[in-house]
Amino acid sequence: MKMDIAIKNSWILTLTEGKLGIIKNGSLGIEGENIVYVGPSEGLNHKSADVVIDGRNHLIMPGLVNCHIHTSMQLLRGGAQDLPEIEWMNKGIGPLAKHVTGDDIILGSKLGVLEAIRTGTTTFSEYTRNVENLVKEVYLPFNTRVVATETINEVSQTNKASLKPTDLYEFDTSKGEQALKKNEELFRIFQNEDLVTCLYGPQALDMVSVQTLLQIKDNAIEQNSKIHIHVAQGRRERLQIEGRFGKGESTAKILNSENLLGDFLIAVHCHDTDETERKLMVDKGSKMIGCPSSITMIDGIIPPIYSFSKFGGDVGIGTDQAPGPGNHNLFREMRTISILTKSMVKDPTVFPAWEMLRLATIQGAKVLGLDKKIGTLEVGKKADIITIDLLDSFLTPIVSHPFHTFIPNIVYSATGKEINNVIINGKLVLKNGKFTEIDEESIIKKANLRAKEIYANAAEDWEKADSKMVQDVRDGLL
């Protein structure tokens, strides 16, 4: 069997058939973009491969799937932490984001994607305005799999820092129409790109009219695509929804009454929903994405991933954006949601390590509609693969009898630095801990220089917003 890449003599997690699919002393073969062999090492003649990777003391597993990520604000990492939820958007990140240029967005995205690849992510569900630019300038040049989602937002105000939480946002439907056209163009532009999938991205019910949402639903069904939308994000959104639709109303209730719940809908966050609403969403076939670190940091709430999943719903996880949680490391997200959920329900057996591994791989792929392509290691699937150095100090010791210690250790102990090879669509992007074609050092240097300029330019606006962080600075705490 002729192959481009072979990895031999390794532990393998296939994550097939609803289990982990552990293979001892296994090998994996890649030809072109696809996996052509996965199984015992004696079944593969690795000598015919162009590149052979010795997998001794390593683990091969599917690449991680980040179901919801905003890399556009990466240069503002550290800019909006430890704030009241009601201040985060308008008083925290808003005054800084005003000074971020289009070039800054591309540079920040490069930084965010590098960080995520280095920690094992091979699929990114990127959600931003002008996402076409990031796909062309970052994701395709970096050979990463991306689910491109154009943000559709009809809020007309350019500066919301002065608004009270109960002041309703004004809608500009022409703004929504323009964004929807951009979203539609994505399907045409990237129809022949195997690494690119497209979704529709209305930002949230408090930022897009129901009329526009209904149009997006029709378009999504026609395109055999899905709607990727922030749902019930907290007190700020609830105040907007009640002000617009009436006291006691909620995002989930309105979406249901307008027939906007269904298998076409991927709901992000959902932490301001109750059990009844979550069960309704699951019964309607809607899927959910939770961002554990982000929502805990920004809203002080544990996202209801466990609640949604116990009703039988499909759930994936994401990192959201760097200014809140800090980074784009899915190993951290697996550990965070497992530990927080155990504490929340007072049961240390819930969300065990093996379930977290599935959540970050095949479950995420299923939520995004990519489970036929990626998420497990099977012949015929795309070769999106990572290898993990099991001799790293954070994972040592390796014990395989009477059970495999590397399963819990990957979830609860790994930092992401243990990743030493990343293969996306059959191409080695990271080899022995080094990027094969990306100048990581140059990107980091440019990001640091430009971030200093952004913060300096935004200082006056940031101080005028008078968030809690401003007072923290005055008190000598930051």
Image (tube, rainbow, N blue to C red):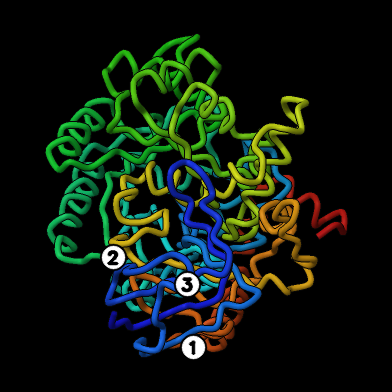
Q: Position of residue 303 (x, y in %)?
A: 60, 34
Image disc number at residue 195 = 2
Kindly report the distance in space between the C-alpha atoms of the residues bearing marks 1 and 3. 30 Å
Please state which amino acid type lies under the numbered disc 3: Ser
The residue at 53%/58% (across/down) is: 13
Secondary structure beneath disc 2? loop
Secondary structure beneath disc 1? loop
Marks 1 and 3: which is nearer the front?
3
Please state which amino acid type lies under the numbered disc 2: Leu
For label 3, the residue is: 27
Kindly report the distance in space between the C-alpha atoms of the residues bearing marks 2 and 1. 21 Å
Left or right: where 210 falls relative to 455? left
125 vs 294, nearest the viewer: 125
The total number of labels drawn is 3
Please state which amino acid type lies under the numbered disc 1: Asp
Q: Are marks 2 and 1 in contact (CB under 8 Å)?
A: no
Secondary structure beneath disc 3? strand
Does 173 sit above or below residue 354? above
Q: Position of residue 168 (x, y in %)?
A: 44, 27
Lower position in the chain sequence, tag 2 or tag 1: 2
The residue at 57%/84% (across/down) is: 432
Position of the C terminus, as image quadrant, is: bottom right
Left or right: where 249 falls relative to 338? left
